[in-house]
Image: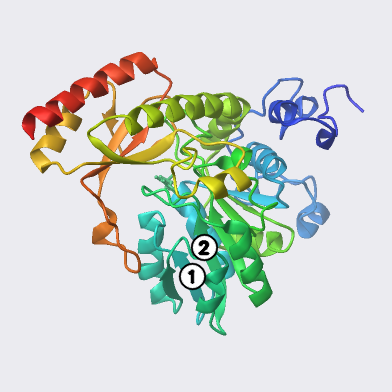
């Protein structure tokens, strides 16, 4: 065995595995990283090999060393049997849903789901004969009351998009499996480092690699991983759809993977401190962050999660749109942006009441979602202090 071949990684701790997962320098002339293989055609040595499609690589759509490196690495990190890579997080959601649904299926989706997932269910899936019922994300084992004979899948996302409801994923998974339904989870907030999805009963896990895997706001990437029961069906669906991540994007994903744990820990610490700071502000009615003991989802978070990432929300006390705009528009260090997971801090006003259908969004005032980046916290606090002063002055 070449001394550069990856060791039997299961023996090692998480940090060591993150360094070695998915790469084999002995296959890359000793270079540390798997390079960017661009390619469609793969040449075969003779007709016999071609007829049997015997080579390790057969055609660009069927896999390249770059894509495989990240697939293997993510499977290793997630405890998955297989992983497929798509050109965005939303594409990873759609690949997962198309893996487990068919015409005539009934699907259960939390009311707090990432909104484009809802749009896919209500639009594309409905057109192809899949019916979606939205459920209260806090339903827990009570999900069983919503099952119908044709319920094929239960989607979960914890915490919920923007509003941070914590879901009892193991209880939902147990009930769904007893019914014979597939369990999906959008695990983007925690990543497999903070919530090992397949260990907790998830069959198909989704990660928008656009966020923490990238860490740089310079990448669109989606990862869908499957346990042994669903791996074959996932791979078949992926190959038939052929919605493939490009080689540069896989390379950037691999690069991000090596430092994701360090960045996440920093985002976690920064965000928890900022969440506590917000909780003490007189202008703030509530902070929606499961790591705060005051959060309704705190007990579930402590039980099931190994940490928190850098994204949370606050609900302000009543304030006019003009006061909110004065606060947010004048912030110097918080960009107004829809994504998250990068090194920079972001803020986003939101109001889910327009599209939720089975739960009511009751808020004392306007709501803001924050992603806390890697800046100096004193600078962020000063920026927000000035923002709150503008809010008060305009109110
Ligand atoms: C929870 C969650 N899932 C999935 C996605 C989709 O990722 P992408 O923007 O790469 O399509 C996002 C993006 O904001 C998200 O917040």
The spot of residue 271 in percent (x, y) is 43, 29
State if disc 2 and disc 1 touch (CB < 8 Å): yes
Quarter of the image with the C terminus is: top left
Q: Give the alpha-carbon distance from disc 1 to disc 2, as whole Å.
A: 6 Å
Q: Which label number is shown at residue 155?
A: 2
The spot of residue 72 in percent (x, y) is 70, 42
Answer left or right for 291 relative to 305. left
Q: Residue at x 23, y 48 (%)?
A: 364
Q: Nearer the viewer, residue 151 or 290?
A: 290
Sequence-first disc among 1 and 2: 1
Label 2 crowd bin: few (<14), some (14–19), many (20+), radius 10 Å: many
Q: Which label number is shown at residue 108?
A: 1
Q: Which label number is shown at residue 371?
A: none
Q: Residue at x 61, y 67 (%)?
A: 182
Does mark 2's beta carbon lie closer than 8 Å to ligand 1? no
- What colouring style does the render use? rainbow
Q: Residue at x 61, y 34 (%)?
A: 37
The spot of residue 231 in percent (x, y) is 69, 59
User: In the figure, 389 relative to 143: above or below?
Assistant: above
């Amino acid at each position: 065995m070449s001394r550069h071949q990856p060791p039997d990684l299961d023996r090692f701790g998480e940090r060591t595995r993150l360094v070695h997962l998915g790469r084999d320098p002995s296959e890359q002339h000793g270079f540390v990283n798997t390079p960017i293989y661009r390619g469609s055609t793969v040449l075969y040595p003779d007709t016999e090999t071609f007829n049997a499609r015997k080579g390790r690589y057969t055609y660009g759509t069927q896999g390249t060393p770059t894509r495989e490196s990240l697939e293997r690495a993510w499977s290793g990190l997630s405890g998955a049997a297989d992983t497929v890579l798509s050109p965005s997080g939303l594409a990873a959601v759609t690949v997962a849903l198309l893996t487990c649904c068919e015409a005539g299926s009934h699907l259960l989706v939390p009311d707090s789901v990432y909104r484009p997932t809802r749009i896919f269910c209500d639009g594309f899936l409905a057109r192809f004969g899949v019916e979606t019922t939205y459920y209260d994300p806090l339903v827990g084992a009570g999900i069983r009351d919503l099952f119908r004979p044709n319920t094929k899948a239960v989607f979960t996302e914890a915490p919920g998009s923007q509003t941070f409801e914590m879901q009892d994923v193991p209880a939902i998974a147990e009930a769904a499996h007893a019914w014979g339904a597939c369990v999906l989870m959008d695990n983007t907030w925690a990543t497999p480092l903070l919530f090992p999805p397949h260990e907790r009963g998830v069959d198909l896990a989704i990660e928008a690699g656009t966020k923490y895997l990238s860490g740089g706001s310079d990448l669109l990437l989606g990862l869908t991983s499957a346990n042994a029961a669903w791996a074959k069906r996932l791979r078949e669906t992926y190959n038939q759809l052929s919605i493939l991540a490009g080689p540069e994007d896989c390379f950037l994903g691999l690069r991000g993977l090596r430092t994701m744990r360090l960045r996440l820990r920093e985002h976690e610490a920064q965000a928890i401190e900022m969440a506590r700071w917000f909780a003490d502000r007189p202008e703030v009615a509530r902070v929606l962050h499961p790591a705060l003991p005051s959060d309704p989802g705190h007990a579930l978070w402590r039980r099931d999660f190994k940490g928190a990432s850098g994204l949370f929300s606050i609900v302000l006390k009543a304030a006019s749109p003009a006061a909110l705009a004065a606060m947010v528009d004048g912030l110097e260090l918080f960009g107004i942006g829809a994504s998250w997971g990068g090194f920079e801090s972001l803020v986003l006003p939101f109001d889910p009441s327009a599209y939720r259908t089975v739960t009511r969004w009751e808020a004392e005032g306007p709501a803001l979602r924050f992603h806390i980046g890697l800046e100096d916290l004193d600078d962020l606090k000063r920026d927000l202090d000035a923002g709150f002063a503008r809010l008060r002055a305009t109110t």
